Image (spheres, rainbow, N blue to C red):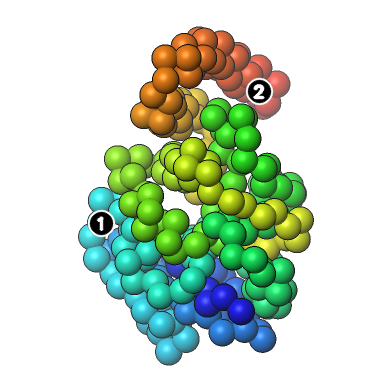
């Protein structure tokens, strides 16, 4: 079996970090390494990490330049063949899921992608990875909570772009798609993602920040004149469309 590195990046995550850690260290029937990169938390997160440090292979708590920078630190610490990021808002669905996933990982493709449950407003929505294709040029098809990525892929792409605060995942997977990375999709639920992360915020200020980062991903990864023209048209229509949808949602949910 492939050696797996599970990486948790966190900052002031005392509310949820223990459930994340437990879901990892309690995995059965498989050997893996667990790495935690904390951004110098001040809310008790480090105290929780210390309670489990005998079950954690490596952990650090130090200042960083944001989520992408912390993820890159985790990559440098990892020794596994495949890496998966399970942050403090996420947790594995059960104690056997890692061994079940590994049993399906055979041929050595660049990315093995699994389903994720998105937990929001008292319900769980199943999210599946879409195959790489033309639509990848517009939205990320992959959720990091369900993706095992080959360590060599991170090395080849230079890790995550630390200039992004939200869209670092999309930037990474778009670059992976553009160099022809192979991906195998399995419709087995791997983890649960809470709606408490920065990318899940639904206020217009946060949504617009995410959209503007996605737009920059397009600009930086669409060098041809044709794609730049396509992106210009896309954003001319997409941003007003999303703003109208947000206004409609707010009007329908006014108490």
Residue receiving disc 2: 249
Q: Residue at x 74, y 49 (%)?
A: 126
Q: Is residue 17 visible?
A: no
Q: Quick one: which residue is furthest to the left in this view?
A: 63
Q: Is residue 99 left or right of residue 140?
A: right
Residue receiving disc 1: 64
Quarter of the image with the C terminus is top right
Q: Is residue 58 left or right of residue 24?
A: left
Count of numbered circles in the view: 2
Q: Residue at x 46, y 74 (%)?
A: 80
Q: Looking at the image, which is closer to me, 132 or 78?
A: 132
Q: Position of residue 41 (x, y in %)?
A: 31, 64
Q: Crowdedness of circle 2 by 10 Å Cα count: few (<14), some, many (20+)?
A: few
Q: Quadrant of residue 245?
A: top right
Up the image or down, 107 lies above or below 197; here it is: below
Q: Residue at x 66, y 84 (%)?
A: 28
Q: Name the N-terminal-most of marks 2 and 1.
A: 1
Q: Nearer the viewer, mark 2 or mark 1?
A: 1
Q: Is residue 164 left or right of residue 33?
A: left
Q: Is residue 206 left or right of residue 73?
A: right
């Amino acid at each position: 079996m492939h050696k797996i590195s599970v990486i948790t990046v966190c900052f002031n995550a005392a509310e949820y970090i223990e459930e994340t850690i437990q879901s990892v260290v309690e995995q059965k029937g498989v050997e893996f390494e667990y790495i935690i990169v904390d951004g110098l938390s001040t809310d008790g997160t480090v105290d929780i990490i210390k309670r489990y440090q005998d079950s954690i292979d490596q952990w650090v708590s130090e200042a960083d330049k944001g989520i992408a920078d912390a993820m890159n630190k985790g990559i440098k610490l990892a020794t596994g063949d495949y890496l998966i990021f399970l942050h403090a808002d996420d947790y594995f669905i059960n104690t056997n899921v890692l061994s079940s996933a590994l049993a399906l990982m055979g041929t050595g493709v660049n990315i093995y992608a699994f389903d994720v449950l998105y937990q929001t407003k008292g319900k769980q929505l199943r999210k599946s990875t879409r195959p790489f294709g033309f639509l990848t040029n517009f939205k990320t098809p992959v959720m990091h909570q369900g993706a095992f990525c080959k360590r060599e892929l991170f090395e080849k792409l230079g890790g995550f772009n630390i200039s992004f605060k939200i869209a670092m995942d999309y930037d990474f997977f778009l670059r992976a798609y553009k160099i022809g990375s192979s991906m195998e999709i399995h419709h087995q639920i791997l983890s649960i993602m809470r709606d408490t992360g920065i990318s899940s915020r639904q206020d217009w200020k946060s949504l617009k920040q995410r959209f503007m980062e996605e737009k920059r991903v397009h600009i930086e990864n669409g060098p041809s004149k044709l794609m730049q023209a396509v992106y210009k048209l896309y954003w001319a229509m997409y941003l007003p469309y999303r703003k109208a949808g947000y206004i409609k949602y707010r009007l329908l949910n006014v108490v």
